[in-house]
Image (cartoon, rainbow, N blue to C red):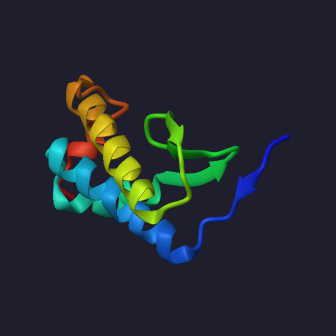
Amino acid sequence: MLVCVTLDASLRASLVSHFADAVMQDAALPPARRQDVEEAPSFSAADGDNICRWGITGSTYAEPWDGNAVSAETFAQSAGEATAALVARTPKNHHYAWLFASR
């Protein structure tokens, strides 16, 4: 049975911020891409797991979650770091070159 937990707006905003900070810094994306990066992740919790899906690459991350905001923020940071590593090593082809555009 799937048990979903609704994340409140404050926690969701914090998760997006932690995720975006990691992606922007670790992938060395220009500030002009911040809004795109912030709009792409979706965070949810189901069956005791914290889940992050990033719409730009289609990446999904999940890990057990104890319901604590601090552990959720740590997870968001980790998912952002993993996403940044993927973005940084992806060839700058026509699909992803816009991520590195400064406007």
Is residue 53 rendered to the left or right of residue 78?
right
Residue 32, placed above or below residue 29: below
Residue 90, placed above or below residue 35: above
Q: Position of residue 88 (x, y in %)?
A: 21, 32
Identify the residue shown where x is 37% and y is 42%: 79
Identify the residue shown where x is 14% and y is 45%: 28
Residue at the far right: name it: 1
Residue at the far bottom: name it: 10
Q: Position of residue 62 (x, y in %)?
A: 52, 37
Q: Nearer the viewer, residue 98 or 65?
A: 65
Looking at the rendering, in which quadrant would you find the C terminus? Answer: bottom left
Is residue 27 rendered to the left or right of residue 87?
left
Q: Position of residue 31 (x, y in %)?
A: 18, 61
Q: Position of residue 95 (x, y in %)?
A: 37, 31
Is residue 15 rendered to the left or right of residue 49?
left
The total number of labels drawn is 0
Identify the residue shown where x is 22% and y is 52%: 24
Identify the residue shown where x is 49% and y is 61%: 68
Q: Nearer the viewer, residue 92 or 69?
A: 69
Looking at the rendering, in which quadrant would you find the N terminus? Answer: top right
